[in-house]
């Protein structure tokens, strides 16, 4: 462990088990936070080496718990510049990117992947193995049991797609033209007309034919949706008006 700031009493960093907890520079650890201890996965075997790696400039507030990996071939990873508010939980083998904001009582089960610049409201629960795409927003009290593609907003129990994270996109510097293109693409895939007989797959394929799959926000959104239906993934959160 190196160069962190311990801002509160009662915090526990690391544990007397095989493996390592590595903490980068300029991190703030709050009162009674528990960082780098043994995971709560029953697959963990006593004596296995387990790992946690935290980057730089993260603020981990009071009563948070962040656990090491469940086995030696994996690692719990947290990137840079994340704000993890009070009583959040990041379980074993999660992989958290950069510049995320997790409000109080956000709970990530094991093996959750969170990309960059996401934002959760309070009391959010994310099921194990879910994938949360960049620039997405998870509404307060949501129970997220499937993937959230990039740029989207979800809410509810079980969480449903509620449109694009428009405010988040604007705050993160997306141009008006980029936002308009994303809205048009979202509407085409998730908001078909009443008389449309095309399936979700047909609409997604049609969108792929229309756009140039270069490095644009729409192409990233399509890629994120597609990857959520890949092997070992959970699909995406449902949308109430889907035609199947």
Image (spheres, rainbow, N blue to C red):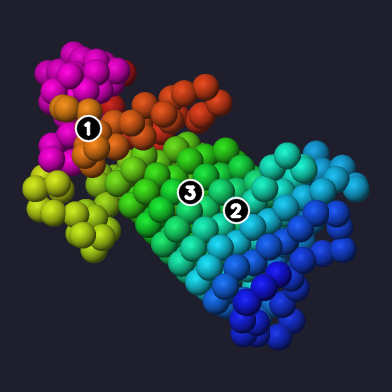
Dot in front, 2 or 1: 1
Is 179 left or right of 223, judged from the image as shown? left
First in residue order: circle 1 vs circle 3: 3
Q: In this view, does 161 lie above or below 64?
A: above
Residue at (15, 48) in percent of width and height:
179
- Residue indicated by mark 2: 77
Distance (Cα) linking label 1 and label 3: 23 Å
Which region is colored magenta?
Answer: 181-210
Residue 57: x, y in percent? 50, 71
Residue at disc 3, secondary structure: strand
In this rendering, would 90 be left or right of 182?
right
Nearest to viewer (mark 1 / mark 3): 1
Judge whether residue 77 can be spotted in this image.
yes
Quick one: label 3, few (<14), some, or many (20+) residues within 10 Å?
many
Res. 139 in view: no
- Say which quarter of the image contains residue 16: bottom right
Q: In this view, does 191 lie above or below 44?
A: above
Q: Pick out the residue farthest to the right.
A: 47
Counting residues from the start of the chain, the first of labels 2 and 3 encountered is: 2
Residue that carries the numbered disc 3 in the rendered image: 114
Query: Which residue is disc 1 drawn over?
Result: 214
Query: Quarter of the image holding residue 173?
Result: bottom left
Instruction: State which mark lies toward you, 2 or 3.
Output: 2
């Amino acid at each position: 462990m190196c160069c962190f700031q311990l801002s509160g009493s009662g915090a526990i960093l690391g544990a007397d088990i095989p493996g390592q907890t590595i903490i980068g520079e300029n991190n703030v650890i709050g009162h009674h936070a528990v960082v780098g201890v043994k995971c709560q996965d029953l697959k963990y075997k006593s004596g296995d080496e387990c790992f946690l790696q935290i980057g730089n400039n993260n603020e981990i507030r009071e009563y948070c718990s962040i656990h090491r990996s469940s086995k030696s071939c994996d690692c719990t990873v947290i990137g840079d510049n994340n704000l993890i508010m009070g009583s959040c939980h990041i379980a074993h083998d999660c992989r958290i990117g950069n510049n995320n904001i997790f409000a109080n009582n956000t709970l990530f089960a094991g093996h959750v992947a969170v990309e960059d610049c996401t934002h959760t409201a309070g009391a959010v629960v994310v099921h194990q193995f879910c994938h949360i795409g960049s620039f997405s927003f998870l509404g307060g009290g949501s129970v997220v049991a499937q993937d959230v593609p990039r740029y989207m907003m979800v809410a509810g129990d079980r969480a449903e797609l509620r449109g694009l994270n428009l405010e988040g996109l604007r705050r993160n510097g997306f141009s008006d033209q980029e936002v308009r293109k994303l809205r048009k693409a979202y509407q085409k895939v998730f908001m078909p007309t009443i008389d449309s007989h095309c399936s979700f797959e047909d609409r997604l394929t049609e969108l792929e034919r229309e756009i140039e799959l270069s490095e644009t926000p729409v192409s990233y959104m399509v890629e994120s949706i597609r990857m959520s239906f890949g092997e070992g993934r959970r699909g995406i959160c449902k949308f109430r008006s889907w035609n199947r």
